[in-house]
Image: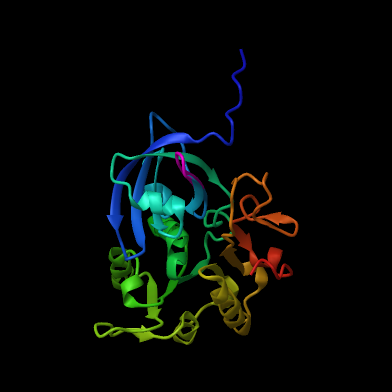
Amino acid sequence: MISARKDIFLPDPATVVEVRKMTASEKFFSFKLDGKSDMRFEPGQFFEISVPGIGEAPISVTSSPEEVAPGEFHMVIRKVGNVTGALHAMDAGSKVGVRGPFGTSFPVDTEMKGKDLLFVCGGIGLVPVRSAIKHVLAHREDYGRITILSGTRSPAERLFMEDLAEWTERDDVEFIETVDVADDHWSGNVGVITTLFSMITLDVGNTSVIICGPPIMYKFVLLELDKMNFADEQIFMSLERHMKCGVGKCGHCQINGIYACQDGPVVKYADIRDLKEAI
């Protein structure tokens, strides 16, 4: 007897394993699918997380595949609506629904292997990119120079402080960060993230770039990369639009001929440079 194909719109039950406050707006969550699961994800992908009676929301994974067991994943969730508000009210042991993983991933194991890497993260854009960074660092011998640029609006909004400290101390990573507005305790760089480009030296011909951040950031980061003579084919970015179904059926995230949930969220800039609606 042939078993019926699983309904792609039917969520699997999962348990909240850990909840930890990170900033005034963001919390860290660890999830585990109930029962035995061989589910794996790739850096840059997302899941649909549902709360019974309220709805579901697409949320990116922040853990790397190496740091969790099959069926487990980590997220950082910003409180912005009904679903995320309900998630913020949960504690360890709470139940949610999970669909996925969905979407494309950062090609760190294919197109980027053997190359130098530049990560450019703005605000909560660090969340999905962290998955790729930690994956690359777990296989450090497969890559050349690694440069990470990170920017937040203020010191109070910085995420993953332990990781930032580790990347700062590593001698095989160049990590530079900035804040838009400093407080009395901040002694680092102040200014938008593009001010950091003058502090780095890159082998442009051998470097792949990963960008994730607020839409306005893309415009100015792409201008800086163009000044440095990066080819559009070397640049990868995450297009996290208002995705709904996650499987390209509802059309909610359609940008002309592409669907952010299926053709993205990770895209090569060369493939979307002519889609003015995309960035």
Furthest residue in direction left, as rendered: 185
Query: In the image, residue 115 lies at what x, y percent?
Result: 53, 65
Is residue 134 shown above or below 148? above
**Magenta span of residues:** 47-54
Is residue 140 shown above or below 215? above
Point out the image quarter for the C terminus.
bottom right
Query: In the image, residue 150 lies at what x, y percent?
Result: 42, 73
Q: Is residue 218 among the parts visible in the rendering? A: yes
Q: How many marks?
A: 0
Q: Is residue 63 among the parts visible in the rendering? A: no
Is residue 151 shown above or below 41? below
Specify whether residue 153 is painted magenta: no
Query: In the image, residue 53 lies at what x, y percent?
Result: 46, 40
**Residue for point 28% across, 69% down:** 165
Furthest residue in direction top, as rendered: 1
Residue 192 relative to residue 112: left or right: left
**Residue for point 37% across, 43% down:** 31
Q: How is the image coloured?
A: rainbow
Query: In the image, residue 200 lies at what x, y percent?
Result: 46, 82
**Residue for point 40% across, 54% down:** 85
Q: Majority secondary structure of the magenta segment?
A: strand
**Quadrant position of residue 52:** top left
Residue 39 relative to residue 242: left or right: left
